[in-house]
Image (cartoon, rainbow, N blue to C red):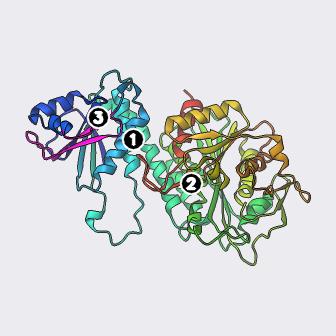
Amino acid sequence: MKIAFAKPEIPASGTLVALAAEGRKLGKLAQQLDKTTKGAITRALEASRFKGGAEEFLTILAPAGVDVARIIVAGIGAPAKYDTLAAQSLGGRLVAALNNTGEKDVSIWIESIGDMKLAEADFAANVAYGARLRFYRFDKYKTKEKPEQKPSVKRFTVLVGDAADAKRTFDPMDKVVDAVNVTRDLVSEPANIIYPQTLAAEARKLSEVGVEVKVLGVKEMTKLGMGALLGVGQGSSRESQLVTMQWNGADSKQKPIAFVGKGVTFDTGGISIKPAQGMEDMKWDMAGSAAVIGAMRALASRKAKVNAVGVVGLVENMPSGTAQRPGDIVTSMSGQTIEVLNTDAEGRLVLADAMWYCQETFKPRVMIDLATLTGAILIALGTVYAGMYANDEELAKQLEESGKATGELLWRMPLAQAYNKMMDSPAADVKNISGSRNAGSITAAEFLQRFVQKGTIWSHLDIAGMAWSDKDSPTTPRGATGFGVRLLDHLVAKHYEEK
């Protein structure tokens, strides 16, 4: 689907979208169209329940007096409350509504209505942003689809007074969508296609946008003492990898912000094997690493004025004669020993070494890890919020604000010494599960905190409930969501880029 920006004029074909506020208050275009069509919109209003609410559409097919095939009056609700997320939702819902109609060309006329505070250029850019986000479809393995089963919209034109300004606003957003869609693709791929070596190869492609990429294999990680990460992958025929990605967009003296991602490309649970039902979903247990790859792509593509580092630990957790056993004790890169009581609590082992390597190598000013870490966070927060843990109040506040701004919501969870003590092991420095069903996401975070060096500002995002969705949302079709890319990009843009 091609996105275009143009000066306002009534098109000669396709679908034209006009705006209305709550209380059926028509925008200037809708009023003009009502006159041109000899009251078609007024009659449609009288025959409908349309009130101008923020999620309402009123469709008039084959209206007289104009050449377009249909007019859609889109509600925006209360103009004063209309914001960027609402505009994104509008763009996404339009694409979703029209993709199955056979319509190829969609034009939406952007205008300020009433006491709207959102500038027209921002309004226009965010409508286009939402449309692109919603248009995503993972269909590369569908070989027998009929043409009528495929999305029909080919062109989405935003009509706005200052089209050039709107396009300038949209350009960096467009690059972020590209990055989000790369993340969605990686998470959607099956585990026979994406495994540690191939995911590392995908990360290498970031060199095309100026990211410096380095890949460590088993030999290098063995020399570094990464027994925690390597223990997870030792049951697989696929060699584990550690990938670092550096974007240097600021002064060389500036310490980087670092993102660390869990990349378990398939998680059987290992010897502590998972139930067969639903195990196919474990292809997306690498969503944290995919989000880090996507975030690094977004920053580099839009030439962010920041130094940033991405580190991802890539493993496959399989049961075999060489697999790690419950009760094994491994030595992490930090020197701390870990008693592995459950081989299905593997992501934290991967992160322990990846985080330590990140701190030792890059000395970041801030480190944020992302992981589909626990089912417990789903029990606590469902699929509305990701769990956020932080050892720094300012970072927690920044992340929460970026979550609200992007719609990728975070809910802060507690860290406390009482939870940390639950991870003490009688046989080693720490155990990888508490042994209790209580506070499972919190104790996992407390485990990770033991691998955060003194003075490192750190946050852990448990995205297990957010990486994949079983239903559509306005800007995300069901499937891989790309969660985390927009969040991290906004965080950097707002708080860490050089101004």
- Position of 12 relative to 351 (above/below): above
Q: Which residue is mark 1?
A: 89
Res. 413 image quadrant = top right
Q: Which residue is mark 3?
A: 51
Which numbered disc, 3 or 1, marks the residue closer to the eye?
Answer: 3
Q: Residue furthest top?
A: 115
Judge from the rendering whether residue 408 lies leftward or rightward of residue 50; answer left or right: right
Q: Which residue is mark 2?
A: 290
Q: Residue at horizontal 64%, vertical 35%?
A: 252
Residue type at mark 1: give it.
Answer: Ser
**Could you say whether the residue bearing mark 3 is in a helix, strand or loop?**
loop
Q: Marks 3/2: CA distance?
A: 41 Å
In the rendered image, residue 345, in percent from the top left (x then y), is placed at 73, 60
Q: Is the residue marked by circle 3 packed among few (<14), some (14-19), or many (20+) residues within 10 Å?
A: some
**Could you say whether the residue bearing mark 2 is in a helix, strand or loop?**
helix
Which numbered disc, 3 or 2, marks the residue closer to the eye?
Answer: 3
**In magenta stretch: residue 462:** no
Q: Residue furthest right?
A: 426
